[in-house]
Image: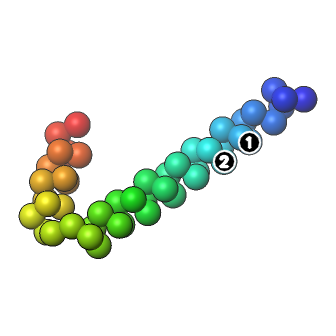
């Protein structure tokens, strides 16, 4: 029973983490300066 529910749990966890990631990035965009955001995007692109 637990095994059959695990894909749903994983899907919910992944979608929730993606939403949290977007919210976190949105907060960063709102709170930080443009120069800081440019540095952050450079870091993300380098990864």
**Label disc, if present, on residue 8 of the rendered structure:** 1
- Is 45 situated above or below 21? above
Q: Choose between 31 and 43: the one closer to the eye.
A: 31
**Location of residue 4 in the rendering, given as x and y in whole percent from the top left corner:** 83, 31
Q: Residue 47, image x and y in percent?
A: 23, 37
Residue found at x 14% / y 60%: 36
Instruction: For mark 1, give the secondary structure.
Output: helix
- The residue beneath circle 2 is 12
Q: Residue furthest front?
A: 31
The furthest residue to the right:
1
Label 2–label 1 contact, CB within 8 A: yes
* Residue found at x 51% / y 58%: 19
Q: Which image quadrant is residue 9 in? A: top right
Q: Position of residue 34 (x, y in %)?
A: 13, 69
Q: Which class describes the residues within 10 Å of circle 1: few (<14), some (14-19), or many (20+)?
A: few
Query: Tag on residue 16?
Result: none
- Return the residue found at the far bottom: 30
């Amino acid at each position: 029973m637990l095994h059959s529910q695990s894909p749903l749990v994983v899907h919910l966890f992944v979608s929730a983490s993606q939403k949290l990631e977007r919210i976190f990035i949105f907060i960063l965009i709102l709170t930080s300066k443009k120069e800081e955001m440019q540095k952050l995007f450079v870091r993300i692109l380098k990864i």
